[in-house]
Amino acid sequence: MKCGISLLLVAAGVVGVVGRSDLRAAQQGAAQQPSFRAATALVEVDAIVKDRKGAFVADLTAADFEVLEDGVAQKVEQFYVVLGPTVKPVAPAAGAPPAAAAQAPLPATQTQRTFVLLFDQEHIEPGAFDRAKKAALQFMKQNFREGDIGGVATPSTMVNNRLTNVRTELEAAIAGLKPSGEQMSLRSAMRAWPRLLDAFEVYLIDYGDREAISRAVSRAIADDADAAKNIGVDSEVVMKARQLLPVLRESGQRTMRMVAALSNGMAKLQGRKTVVLLTDGFFVEDSWGNLRQIADLANRANVRVYTLDTRGLNRGTASSEIFEVGPHASATPAGEATGFDTASDGPNSLAVDTGGTVIRNENDFPKALDEIATDTSSYYILGYRSSNPVFDGKFRTLTVRVKRSGVSVRARKGYLATQPAASPAAQAGKAKAVPPPGAEPAPAAAANAPPTSIPLPAAANAASPANVPAPPRGVLRLQPDVRDRLVAAGTIAPERTTRPEPPAEVLAQARAGWEAYQKGDIAGARAPLAAAAQHPASPAWVHYALGWSEYGRQGYEPASVAWEHVRAVAPEFEPVYFDLADAYLQLKEFGKAIDVLRKAEQRWPGDVEVYNAIGSIQASRGALTDAVRTFEGAVVVNPNDATACYNLAKTSELRYIQSTRLRVTSQSLPAVLEDRDRAVEYYRRTITLGGQFVEQAREGLKRLGVV
């Protein structure tokens, strides 16, 4: 995994152009639950299996499951079934390695569930907010059982700054929530003349899309012809969009940062961890790289995100106002709206990518939350050792199948193959070492007395949105071989013969900065890293780490300066090209982003991720023809890359829909139909190849009327 832009990005409103408490009483039971990370080096997969009626299928065995990693079948070595409040171990599969087979079977014990209800108050209409609160209170009374841990959060704060097992405290936290005044102000601003339909239209206008501007101008004239006579409507529309876009962008990023902070905070808790995101949807059009990184972070923490669309059955109607069907909608021959609902794209992606689920078109919120409680109470846990033993830091797709007809299975879509942390026992007696990039800290010892709550890290406690930093994305992206070069060798390899050894004090500063960064103290990491980087002999890894500390503080320009230094002294270090492009995108330096990736293309012409990254940027800027050509090049480079196939299908579909909104002539019809045929072909190929985009490909076929 090299960069957010090469992972997930949206274009023209359709998700998917993809490139690259401390509770001792609860922990005593949870300590006996299966754990396949860290010391055991097993991969853990939770799987929910249901029959056609939606009931959990509880009588499966390990032999009934098939687990594939990047399309390669894996051997399930440990197998558990969680039924309601208990976890039941099953004997290891025949032929399991001695280390697994020698483990004593676990006794059936109560499982620990952790729920955090995240009220996205900046993106929920006041009426829906009140209904969501009532449903949440009912959920707590009926579904929060002994042994559970819970929390209540908004995008700007964790209520009471902690998780707790005290139900009355959670109920009081929910009752005290209020709708956001910012949401109501934004809603009024969107309605004010000249009226804009939704966040995506604002985005297109800011980008300079003439068709979007024209529609907004026509609407303004129709709404108030007299006002239009006395003012330049075009300039008024553009000015309003440019004022609204930063507000929409920051509001959406606050929501995403809180999901990241919650995932970080719950990482060391045992049992099933669930974030229930209650939202109308939020703006993510130019933040898809960040969103995918947050989904990766949640996967590392074993957190599932469930999303409840609080618009209920009003989705896409005139009553949903800010999020009503916008200019990117297409229409059926009967004139019914079938537009893409960009507001729900972000929440949907979080749910799908983390193994959760999406509940939408549902006005009965208590019923929806009951479904989530049921869904998180019964599941299978499968553990396997990867047949690919190299921790290469890349995203590996997971596919879980059940060899029984009439059932469906849902599991997370993949994981990052990062080096497991050493076990606490292995650390005993050793001198404290500098943790390499990507390593996870050892868990803290349990408290001697049973406290009643779990304080979360500062990232989740901060009352001010500005103090809720983005997740330390550099930790997620660094590949282990790169990590070894950056820390163990102290430099990127080719520098050894051209640069002197840095003084010990410089390395000490750098290590102190990296330790702070690993702990999530991004602000504290910057000063020692910057000081170390000032020395002319400072190795490239110091500048690389400094770039991530700047990026985490949203200092995109200084991050780009640090990473340009890395590229200059170590041009063979491929990850920095993607990181640079990401930083330039945040600065809206689209030309520079493309230029950096073109340089990567010249150096690594066979790397399909470079093509995916370039095409993603082109698609996000509306250059669909260029994007289609780029993704066609990607599938030539690697015809079996599911991401490239999906990207080509998606951009072809987007161009097809864009063309159908215009007047199709007999001369242009063949090209339009060619786009549709290409989209169908590559959606089907994506499904055949398997992986994390199969469901999105099936949805694409449905949109195109293909069964």
Image (cartoon, rainbow, N blue to C red):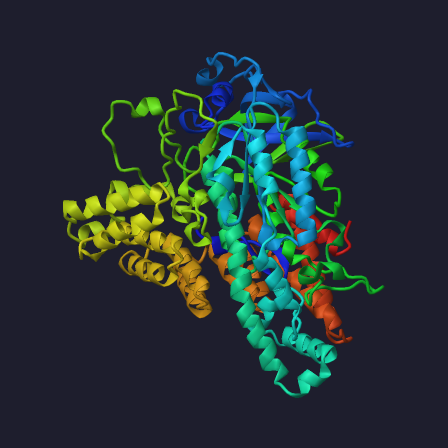
Q: Residue 318 falls in which quadrant of the image?
A: bottom right
Describe residue 206's horizontal placement relative to residue 335 as left or right.
left
Q: Residue 172 falls in which quadrant of the image?
A: top right
Q: Residue 239 falls in which quadrant of the image?
A: bottom right
Relative to 555, residue 129 above or below: above
Q: Residue at x 70, y 78 (%)?
A: 218
Q: Position of residue 198 (x, y in %)?
A: 65, 64
Q: Residue at x 64, y 20 (%)?
A: 61
Q: Position of residue 305 (x, y in %)?
A: 58, 41
Q: Is residue 177 visible?
A: yes
Describe residue 275's horizontal placement relative to residue 318 as left or right.
left
Q: How many marks?
A: 0
Please tell me which residue lies in front, 309 or 391.
Answer: 309
Q: Position of residue 54 (x, y in %)?
A: 75, 32
Please tell me which residue lies in front, 277 or 211.
Answer: 277
Describe residue 301's horizontal placement relative to residue 334 as left or right.
left
Describe residue 492's horizontal placement relative to residue 411 as left or right.
left
Q: Residue at x 61, y 85 (%)?
A: 232
Q: Residue at x 54, y 53 (%)?
A: 8
Q: Position of residue 707 (x, y in %)?
A: 78, 49
Please tell me which residue lies in front, 383 or 526.
Answer: 526
Relative to 549, residue 173 above or below: above
Q: Residue furthest bottom?
A: 230
